[in-house]
Amino acid sequence: MIFPGIVEQLLADSDPLAARGSHFPGRAKNVIFLFMTGGVSHIDTFDPKPALHRDVGKEIKADHPEIANRPGYERIFLKKPQWEFSSHGESGTEVSTLFPHVATCVDDIAMIRSMHTSHSNHYNATLGMHTGSFAFSRPSIGSWVSYGLGSENRNLPGFVVIAPKQTYAGTQVFSSDFLPAAHQGTLVVPGAEPVANVKPRVPSDRQRLELDALQAFNRLHKDKRQADAALSARMRSFETAFGMQMAVPDAFDFSKETKTTLGNYALQPGQTSGFGWQCLAARRLIERGVRFVELIDTGSSGNWDAHGDMMSHVGLAKNVDQPIAGLLKDLKQRGMLEETLVVWTTEFGRTPFNNKADAKGREHHPWAFTSWLAGAGVKPGVVYGATDEHGLHSVVDKVHVHDFHATILHLMGLDHERLTFRHAGRDYRLTDVEGNVVNGVLA
Amino acid sequence: MIMRYCYILLSTALCFLNVTTNAADREGVEFFEKKIRPLLVKRCFKCHGGAKAGGGLSLATSAGWQKGGETGPAIIPGEPKESLLIDAINYRGLEMPPPDKGGKLPKEEIVLLTKWVAMGAPAPGDDALGGMSLKEARSWWSFQALPKGGGKLTSAKIDALINEKLAQQKLTLSTITDKRTLIRRATYDLTGLPPTTAEVKAFLADPSADAFDKVIDRLLQSPQYGARWGRHWLDVVRYADTAGENSDRPLPHAWRYRNWVIEALNRDMPFDEFVRWQLAGDIVNAKTDDQRLREGIIATGYLAVARRYGHDIDKDIHLMHEDVIDNLGKNFLGLTLGCARCHDHKYDAVTSEDYYALYGIFNSTKFAFPGCEPKEQPRDLVPLMDNAKADAMMADYQRRLDEYNNASKFEESEAQRLKQVAAKAYRVLSKALVEETKSASIHENADGKLDRLAVKKGEVLQLTVMPNGNHGADTTRIELEITKLGDQPKTYNVSDLIPRLTKQGPFVKHNGATWCFFDVAEGPRFLLNRKDSVDGVASLQAWANGDTPSVFVNTSNSPVKVWTTLPPKAFFMHPGVKRDVALSWVCPEDGEYEVRGTVTDAHPAPGLDGVSFRFEHFPNAKFGDGLVGLTDSYTARDKMPVKPAIPVAYAVVEGNIKNARLQQRGDPKQPGDEIPRRWLSVFGGEAVSSGSGRVELAEWIVDHPLLARVMANRIWQWHFGRGIVATPNDFGSRGEAPTHPALLNLLAAQFRAGGYRIKPMHRLIMKTAAYQRSSQVDPSRRELDPNNRWLAHYSRRRLSAEEIRDSLLSASRMLDLSTAEAHPFPPEATWKFSQHAPFNAVYDTDRRSVFLMVQRQRRHPYLALFDGADPNSSTPSRESTTVPTQALYFLNDPFFHRQAAGFAATVDAKLSEDEQIQHAFKSLFARPATTDETTIATQFLAKYPGNTKAKWSAFARVLLSSNEFLYVD
C-alpha cells in the first residue's frame, strides 16, 4: 500500500507469502486467535454446572493425571463454581458473571463445551493447542494458515502474534519450524517499539538516500549477474521493509479511532498496552490484510493458573472481557465479522474438584474445557457438545484439539488432510494423523 | 477416557500395521497404501484394529483378514463376491460398520474396497523388512559396498565424471572464475570469513601454477577452519546450549563438546575416529592416558546434548531416546530410524524391533541429567578426571563440610549455654551515655573504683557498646587498658589488637589473655565475617556480622577519611540496629587489676545522638572458659569449605545394562517383547556382546559403507550448496537418488581409503574445475537446470547467519577470534527455572558466531532471522530465505549500525576520498570499485548530510547491506 508496485512485483516471482488459493471456498479470510494463558476454568465461565452446587463437598474418584501419586491428593471432593450463571441473548446461552460483556455477544458465538486435550501440563498443552504436537517443535497453526493461504499485504507479515509476555513453550508456539521462514509469527510486544527494528534509526529522507545508493549498487551488481531471482527478491525486500517502517506504526496508531471505538475496547486515548490495545490492533491488522493474528493475554506466570485461589480469575477476566466484546461488536459493525473468524481458547480447563472441599483453587484439567468460535462461517448462537453433570469429562460430541484445528482450517477453506508439507521424508500436517471437522458449529 | 483411548487406537493403528511390501505388485501396494489403508483405519479399526478384534476379526494385517473372524475369512483375494467383508459393507447379512459405529460407508468407499479385493487384495507381503522387501533392501543402492581400491581419485577424474553428465544434459559450462572471486569463495567456504585485502593481494601477485593450492593449504591450517566446519557438524547434531525440557535449563558444560568438535576438525581427526568417540569415547579411551580419556568423555557430549522433553525428563525419557536414535540414524547413516518408534518404517528396511534394539543400547547408557523443574539441579555430569581422584577430592570435601557443620552446631549450642551462664552472674562496673561528639570515661563512671579489681583466671571483663535510643549505630572509638598490679605488672591494651585484629579469628590471643569480639543480643555470637579492608581502605580491618555490628582497627599511621575521619592507630567498635557489640577480655591469671579507658564518639555528625556503653565483670570462670573453647572451635575449623571444582562434561557413561522392551505404538506404558541389543537386521543384526553396546554400535556404523557415503556427500554439499544426494540426511527410499552415483561412490571410497581425513577431500574438491567455475550463467541456461544439479556453473549463495555476523564484526575490526569457553549462565545453585519462568537469555559476544548461546525453546532472535540451524532437529543444509524483516535488520538494528560505524572509523582520514572508496571496496568485496561505483559513492558522500563520520557511517551501511557483501559468487 505504500509502494503499490511492489505487490505486483512480489507476486510475479515465486514468493512464499503470495496470496494462494484455498482447497475450497473458505468462509473466513482471516483469523483472530485469542489465547488465554494458564487454563481457564470452564465451570466458572462458560460451562454452567448446577449439580456442583448440589454435590459440593462430595468425595469422588477419578484417575486424573494431576492427582496420580500426588501426596495429599489421595482423596478429592467436588468444589462448586464461585460465579453465578445466567442466560443471555436470544440464544439463551449461559455465561457466568466473570464475562458480562462477552455474555452480550453470545448470539454470535458457537460455544464448544466439550473440548478436551492430550496433556495436563501447561507447556505441552499450550504447544499442542498451537501446533498439534504435545512434545515436539512443529509449525504453529498461524504458520500453517499463512503457508496455506499466503498474505494479502506485502508491507506487513502474514502472521502476527501480539503478546505482552511469552507464554509457555517459548517461541515454539508461533514458530514456522520446518515451514518456510516467511510464515514465522512476527512478535509484537505492546509498547513503544512493538516490532523489532521497525523504528527508523535515521530520518526517513536520509534513509531514502541510503536505500537509493544501495539499490544503485545492487543494480550494477545484478546487471553483471544475469537475472538471479534471489538478488532481485532481496532488493525488493528492502523496499518492503522501508514500507513496513510506516505500515507497522500506522497499524498501531490509534489516533484516528473515535472515542466511542476506543471506549468499546475499554481503551483510553494514548494507551499503548492492555488487552484492549491488543484487540483493536488485531482489528486494524486484519483490515490491512494480515492473515492470522494471535493475541496472548498474559505470560507464563501470573495467569489463569489458579491453583491457589480462583479469585485470580476476576482480574484476568476483567482484563479481557470488555475488549473481546468490543472487538466482536466492532468487527460486526464494520461487516468484518463476515470474513473474520474469531477463536477464543485456553490450553485446558480446571478441575471441578480439589483435595479439600474448601480449597480455594483448582488444578489443571485436560479432560474438559470450553472454547468458542465466532464470525465467518460459524453457526451463531449455538452451544456444541457437553460435559457431564460435574464438568469432569467431555461426554457429548467431544472435540479434541485436533478436531478444533481441523475446523479452523476448514473455515479457512483448507482441508487439514491436504495441507501438508514434506519434511525429513514425511508429509506433515497440523493435525498429525487425526482430526475431524466439527460440522455442528458450521453455519 | 475410553473414548480418548479409541481415538488413540484409531490414530495410531496406522502405525501398528505390519507394513510390508510385495515387490511384485508395487502398484497394488501403492493403491492399498493410498486408498485402502486410510479407509480401513478410519472406518474399521475402532473395532477391528487391534488384538481385541471385534468378532475375532482383525483387519490390521493381511494375515488377519485372511484368517478372518468367527464367521470365516473376511476376504477371498480376487473374489469380491465371495468375500464377507464386501457383503458386510453392502449390508448384505452382516452390517458393517454397524449403524451405531458410523453406519454404512459412502458409496465411493464401497467401490474402492470392492476394487481392491477384486485386484487380489494386494498388500505389503511378509518377506519384508519394514517398508522394503528383503530383496529390495539387499539391493538398495546406498547399502552396497564401496568400490574396491580407492585412494586414486583425482580432481581431474571428478571433472571428467561431471562433464560426462553435463554433456548428456547438453549443458554448456561456465568458465573458470577470476582469482578475486575464487579467493573470496574459498575463504568463506573454509573459514566462514572474508579474505583480508593482503591475502587477496598476495594471491593476485602469485603467478605460480599452484597459487590456489597454497591458498587452500593456508586456509586449512587456519584455526578459523574449525569454526566454520565445526559449525556444519553442530548443525547436523542439533547442538544447543539448553536442554529443551519445559524450563529449558542451561547446559553449562555443553560448550566442551562444541569446542571439541571445532578442535577435532581443526586437527583433521579421522572421521571414523570422530564418530567412534562421539558414540563411545568414554569406553574406547578408557585405557589410554588421562588427556585422551578426557577428550573421549567430552566427545560423548554428542549423545548427551539430545533434546530433553516434558516437565519431568525421566518420565519422557523415551522421547529423548527417540531424539538420539533419530539423530544418529540421520547423521551417520542417512537413515530415518526415528520413524520406527511407533511402527515399522513405512518405506525403509527398518523395523520397530530394530529401533528397540538400539533403544536398549542407549537405555543402558547413563546420560548426564540437566535438571528439570520437579527434579531441580543437574546430576550425573561426568568428571573429567580419574574417578578415584575425583572421589577422593569429594570425600575430603565432604569430611571438611561435616566438620564445619558439626563445629557450627557446637558453636550454636555453646552460644545458648554461655548466654545463660552469663546471665547467672554479672556485675555492671560502669555505664554511661556518650553524647554526640563526646567522650566518656569507663573507669571514672564506675560506682566503685576500677583501680583495684579482683579478677580470677577465666573470669571476664566485657565492654558492650550499644546504639543510643533508636538511632542505630555509630562508630565508637575505644581506648582500654587493663593492668595487673603487683610485683610483676602486666598490661593488656586494646592497642595490642591493632596489628593483630584479623590474624587469628574473631578474637585475639595475646600475652595469655583472650580478647573476643561478638554480638551479644542472642548470646555470644562471634563476628564471623573477616574484612581485610573497609570501604576499600586496606588499612581498615574488621570483624563483623554483615556490615554491623563490627569491631575494626585503623592500622595506618595517619588518619583515614571514610564516612568520617578516623584517627590513626586506633580501635573501634560499631554496634548495629538492636545489635550491641561486645569486647570481652578473658583473664589469664588470678590477681588484682586496674582498668582505665575511654569511649569516644568517633563519628561526630549532626542528627546522630551518640552511643552508650556498659562495662561488666562476669565472675564465673565457666563463662571465660566457654569463650576460649569457642575460639578453639573457630581455630580448628576453617572457613566453610569450598566445593572442589572437579571439571565435568555433559556427557554419558555406561549405565545399567539391560535390553529394552518394545513399546507398542511408541507408548512406554504398553511394553511388548524384550528386544536384544543388536545392530539393524538389514545389516545383519549382529548382537551386542558386552556393555551397553555403544562400542560395537560405533564399529558397525564405521564399518558400513553408508558412513563414508553420507559424509562424502555432506562435504560435497557444504562446498557446492547441494549434495550429490540432495537429501543429505536421507539415503533411504524417500530420499533423492544421487545425481552422480559413480562420483559419490568414488568420493566415498576415496574418503575411506584416505583414512577418513576431511582436509584432503577439500583439496580434491576445490581443485576441480567444477568448484572453480564462474557463477555467471545466462538465463536460458539457468532454465535448463534451475537447481544447478549438473554443476554447469557455481551456485551463488547467500552467506549463512554466522558468516554475515562474523563478516560485519570483521569489517568493523571488532571480531574477537579467540575461542570462547563457558557461557555466562547464572550459577547453578541459583536456578529456579520452571515452565512458568523458563531460562531465557541472549548473551552478546564479539567472538565468532559459532560461540553464540543457542536456546532450544526460544530461538536466538538473530540466528532465527537469518535461517540459523534448528536447535531441535538435525539441519543438514541451511535455508536461504529472503524476508523483509531481514531488510529491517540492515536498516535499523543497533548491532548492524555499530559495525557500520566501526568500519567507517577504519577508513584512513589522510587518504583522498577516491582512495577511501577504493579501500572500502577492496576490503569488503575483495575488488576495486568501478568508475560507475565511484561516481555513485562520490555523489552519495556529497549529498548525505552531516560530518565525515556521519557520511561514512551511512556509506558503510550501504555497502554492508549490499547484495555483493551478502552473496558469494
Image: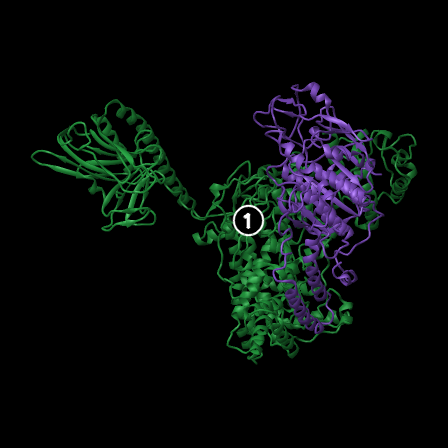
A102 relative to B388, above or below: above
Which chain is tinted green? B
Q: Secondary structure at mark 1?
A: loop
Colour seen for chain A: purple
Q: Chain of mark 1?
A: B
Estimate the x, y position of residue B228 in percent, counting from the top left: 57, 61
Q: Nearer the viewer, residue B35 or A208?
A: A208
Name the amino acid type tagged 1: Ala
Residue B530 occupies quadrant: top left
**Residue at the disc numbered 1:** B841
Q: For the C terminus of chain A, which image quadrant?
A: top right
B4 relative to A51, above or below: below
Q: Nearer the viewer, residue B155 or A88?
A: A88
A278 relative to B155, above or below: above
Residue B739 occupies quadrant: bottom right
Q: Nearer the viewer, residue B505 or B496?
A: B496
Q: Residue furthest left?
A: B487
Estimate the x, y position of residue A308 in percent, counting from the top left: 59, 29
